[in-house]
Image (cartoon, rainbow, N blue to C red):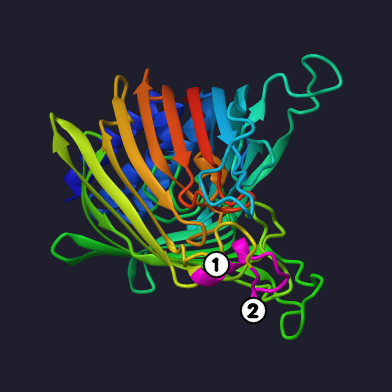
Amino acid sequence: MATTRTKWLALLGSALIGAASAAFAQDSGPLIDLLVKKGLVNDQEAENLRAELVKDFAANTSAGKLDLSSRVQRFTLAGDVRVRYQYDNETQNTTTATSVTEPVQTNPNNDRSRYRYRFRFGPTVALTNNWITGLRLETANSSTSTNDDFGAPGSTNFAKDANTAYIGQVWIQYAATNKLGADRVDFRIGKYAHPFFNPGVNGFWIDTDINPEGLSEEFVFNNIFSKWSLAVRGGQYLLANNARAAGRVAPFLNTPSMLYIAQAELSNTHIFESNVYGIRIAPGFVAFSGQENNSMTLNQADTSTTSNYDNLFTLLMPVEYTFKVLNQPLAVYGTYGLNLHGAKRSDFLYSTSATSESPVFTSAAGDPSAYNQMFNFGLRFGGSRNPGDLQVTAEYRFIEPGAYSAILLDSDYNGGRTNGAGAILSVAYNWTDAVFSTVTFFHAENIDKNSIGAVGYHKADVLQIDFSAKF
């Protein structure tokens, strides 16, 4: 064993130290851990080798001159840049209380073109004992968009007063294997990308640009039967921490408005040529709790932070199955959602009274039905990881007015509103593993054509042409 161990140490040492490569040296940790696991080196020999690599890295590379705290195990910088042309034409509903037919549009060509950009950048720092922290800067301050506009209004042409970077993510994380009876655990606190399975273009039931604020937990159990694994996830997120809103009564005077998400994913997947194949099934729910203020009517567009955070308990069933066709991955995916409080949420949307307990309906729609269902269904063909990959996605969406909340929906589809149904077509091509182009078209029309005000749009068309780079 001593001869074998010496041979492996000599081989590894010459490969890593002799290379004097910053990338190779930084990535050597998993290989050293594997040698320890196989019993080819002991813990002390592994630590000595790590120390020698760090010493050589610092002495022989320019990157090694960076002085990092001894508490830092790994320091990673990453980000992306995107330039976009966007055309959209979103036509408002104009039904009146005396009309019961398809609304007559006074502005059927409410179109505009925008030239946009996005920039996201930040460090991720791996600390000792399985702790991680990080932050990310983003353009734009919207909760569901990180886009800024070229030629935006400013004090002069080419002004920089609209080009502001915001803190889009900031978090502390604990991620470890073989803890608390699970094969892997992951706990996060702060503002970060959510961990939930959410198939669909830009995400279906939660926009991929949303960074929820609060706590999340994930427990992963591998091979619970045959090759199936189970991931249990939960999230407790703040919607509004200033609970002393006008009209509140005890016991809700100082209770924050909250978003709760839970999901249990069963999966049987494997990776081949950088693509994931297999099946994922992830039932869960999304729920609001908070204001319980029945003197406030729901904001019709349902995109404002003053929206009423009540009457949402939507059960969700996302499913995806990926298999090989013509030597390429073909994914069939979909999600069905049912809001158990959809009827009451529809009353908030359609009533003109000041209380949901005694709604008054004066619109052409009258007293609406529950309007409590939503779903998407899509096909995705091709890869999106390697140079030359071409990926085509076609998806259909259907979201009734009371089924969900627009503060969570994809803002590109139907303006992020409910009461919409229609299709999405997206084509993406990878020029390299870091540079790619995407063309996406969104089309939605209202489900309830007699809805009042801004419950969805009469019609919403959006075309996006993107050129992106990630690093």
| Picture quadrant where residue 136 is located | top right
Estimate the x, y position of residue 424 in percent, counting from the top left.
39, 36
Residue at the outermost front position: 98
On the image, numbered disc 1 is attached to which residue? 367
Residue at the outermost right position: 155
Residue at the outermost top position: 157
In the image, 107: left or right of 377? right
Residue at the outermost bottom position: 251
Which label belongs to residue 47? none
On the image, numbered disc 2 is attached to which residue? 357
In the image, 339: left or right of 11? right
Between 160 and 292, the residue placed more toward the observer is: 292
Residue 54 magenta-drawn?
A: no
In the image, 83: left or right of 179? right
Label 2, residues with CA under 10 Å away: few <14, some 14-19, many ≥20: few
| Picture quadrant where residue 374 is located | bottom left
Report the label total: 2
Between 387 and 426, the residue placed more toward the observer is: 426
Magenta stretch: give its range.
343-360
What amino acid type is highlighted by mark number 2? Glu
